[in-house]
Each structure stands twice: as C-alpha cells, then as structure tokens.
Image (tube, rainbow, N blue to C red):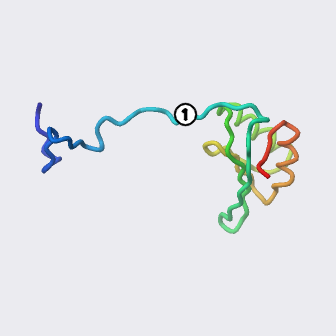
Amino acid sequence: MRENLFEMGANFEDGWRADNKNKSNKPSSTELKAPDKHQLYFAKEKRRGKVVTIIKPFYVAKSDLQALVKTLKKKLGTGGTVKENSLEFQGDIPEQVRKHLELLGYRFKK
C-alpha cells in the first residue's frame, strides 16, 4: 500500500482511519406516508422583513410535493416553494393553508 503523505502521524494499522475515506453514499431514507398519516406543523420566519409560513415534514414523493405546492399556490394566490421536505409560502397564512391541506386529508399536530 502506498503511504499517503497528507495524513502524517496516523498509523492505519493501529486502528486509526481517515474521516474522508469510506463515505457512505446512502440517500436519506424517508418513508412515504399517506396524507392521513402525516403530523404536520407550522413554523414562521421573517426573511428580509417579510413573513414566510413553513409547513413540514412531508413524507411524499418529490413530484407529488411539487404538484401540491402548485395547486396550493393557485388556491391561495401567493408565492411558494418546496425546500427538502417542507413547503414555504409567502405571507402569514397558516389558517388558509391548514384549511386547504385538511380538505386534502393531511393531519396536523395539536
């Protein structure tokens, strides 16, 4: 085995290992759930002086989440996007979003 010059002081035969070797390429596992099995909750953030309503966590396929945000944006008349497993909407509109998501069968934490 050729010695790596950049990892000085570590003798790999003594049980040491480099952190940057053998990285696992496992994708983050998220199980898909039916809408009635979700436990969604709201969060609000201020970005550049404006309020953003965040709803998370969603356990659906990325394409389904894109379709969901598209329909909600039309119904609510506001801008929105998908970030990882959450939806973000412009404005302080949790009641309106909750109403539309409950009609679609999603549940929320109490």
**Considering depth in this image, is 100 or 22 the residue closer to the camera?**
22
How many marks can you see?
1
Name the residue located 52 percent from the left edge and 36 percent from the top edge. Answer: 28
Quadrant position of residue 30: top right
Q: Considering the image in quadrants, where does the N terminus appear?
A: top left
The crowd level at tag 1 (other Cα within 10 Å; few <14, some 14-19, many 20+) is: few
Rendered location of residue 6, percent (x, y): 16, 47
**Left/right of residue 25 with respect to residue 77 in the rendered view:** left
Find residue 44 and report its image quarter: bottom right
In terms of secondary structure, where does tag 1 sit? loop
Q: Quadrant of residue 48?
A: bottom right
Does 106 sit left or right of 59 as displayed? right
Give the residue at mark 1.
29
Give the image location of residue 31, x and y in percent: 62, 32
Q: Is residue 94 above or below residue 103?
A: below
Q: Residue at the spot x=72%, y=65% of the render? A: 50
Identify the residue at the far front of this view. Answer: 14
Image location of residue 7, percent across then percent down: 17, 47
For badge 1, the amino acid type reads: Ser
Which residue in the rendered view is the most extreme toward the bottom? 49
